[in-house]
Amino acid sequence: MRTDHPVVVLGLFETGLAVARSLGRNGVHVVAVGHRPCWASASKYVSEFLICPHPLTEEAAFCEFLSRRFGGHAFKPVLMVTADEFLIAVSRNRASLADSFLIGIPEERLLESIVDKYAQARLAEGCGVATPATHCPAAQDDVDELAARLHFPVVVKGRYVAQWRRSLGAVAKAFVVDDARDLARVLSRIWSLGIEPIVQEVISGPDANHYKVCVYVSPDGKLRLCFGLRKIRQSPPRLGAGSAVRSLAWPQLLATGLSLFQGLKYTGVGSAEFKLEERDGRLKLIELNPRYWQQNWLAAQCGMDFPVTEYRELTGQQVACPSTFEEGVVWVSPAADLRSAVAYMRSGELSISGWLGSLRGKRVLADFSWDDPRPFVRRILSKAA
């Protein structure tokens, strides 16, 4: 593989670290960019880590920073987005950034609709993909009328992920509310923070009913990769990110995911999370993320290397397109999964033997690698400080 084009990874942590390792092991020069320090910058596969202006609050300064720092290269760097807060800034300024970078994110109008969770649900329904009932109250006056039509409990989350995380952080992805009074209280708090909320029905079933379909589609619309996984546990339980997941090629899952991506005429890297509804046996869309997802290293270890495939595509090289991948491989984020397992044990849903048994077989660790141990050590030390 030719490696004359460097790669600029926007965002790091577990997601960006996996992208850097995939490319670095293939000899690609990787520079990471973030708006705050990160333990993953200790990786030997990250040649340089640069602190940038915040893309949400300083969009113009952020784009000027990228162009100034990376413009003028004989071989344009490939830009890879691994965190939500960078998506809109890159999309809205892609015309000017394209002078300095090779960019493979979805086209602007589609991306703007996807990052709007309310619009995203409407798009999915147009593709024939089931979604939970979704509402978008705009003011306190809407709450009483909405509450009268809801079947509690319901989930309240942000219409825009980046907006939500800026005010509430990445740990609390959503709130489950049990009645109209609780709904009014939660919505009042969210509005006071300047966050636009959406309210969704709760999809019944355990956390292990969560699945994900991940794709890479070339700029000319050709499906290159399609990967599936199932969550084993989430951290925190119910509304968290996957702390342990397993690769899975369930035909119904992959077909549902593809019907969504193909219906949207999607291009680039993306992941769609679904939950299997116990009451009707349907896979319902939780969310679609138009970027690299947290467990992309699992796909690489199962035979589908998304960063290398995208790199080859955008730099005009021959692309390998495997149609199958290894099933049953477990990806685990050790510290997060330990916390998660303890929470499941306290609720009586998991035993120690059940936890250990779920991790048997071939495993992939989110942050540790024998040939690149420094990020893991830095992460442990940063938590101990």
Image (cartoon, rainbow, N blue to C red):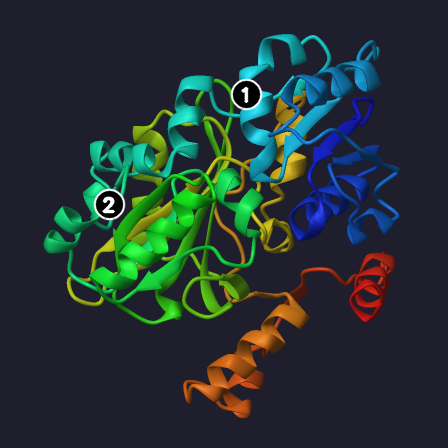
Residue matched to label 1: 91
Helix or strand or loop: what does disc 2 sit on? strand
**Disc 1 marks which amino acid?**
Ser
Marker count (numbered): 2
Identify the image quadrant of residue 101. top right
Indicate left or right for 10 with 32 as reference.
left
State the mark number for residue 134.
2
Residue 286 lies, in percent from the top left, at 35, 50
Q: Which numbered disc, 2 or 1, marks the residue closer to the eye? A: 2
Q: 21 and 315: which one is in front?
A: 21
Q: Decide: is 153 above or below 271.
A: below
Indicate left or right for 42 with 225 as reference.
right
Cα–Cα span, label 2 and label 1: 26 Å
Decide: few, some or many residues near mark 1? Use Cα within 10 Å; few <14, some 14-19, many ≥20.
some
**Point 64% across, 52% down: residue:** 297
Q: 148 and 252: which one is in front?
A: 148
Q: In this rendering, does residue 165 appear at all?
A: yes
Identify the image quadrant of residue 3. top right
Which quadrant: the C terminus?
bottom right
Indicate left or right for 194 with 318 as reference.
left
Q: Decide: is 208 above or below 195.
A: below
State the mark number for residue 286.
none
**Point 78% across, 67% down: residue:** 383
Which quadrant: the N terminus?
top right
Q: In this rendering, does residue 130 appear at all?
A: no
Q: Decide: is 313 above or below 290.
A: above
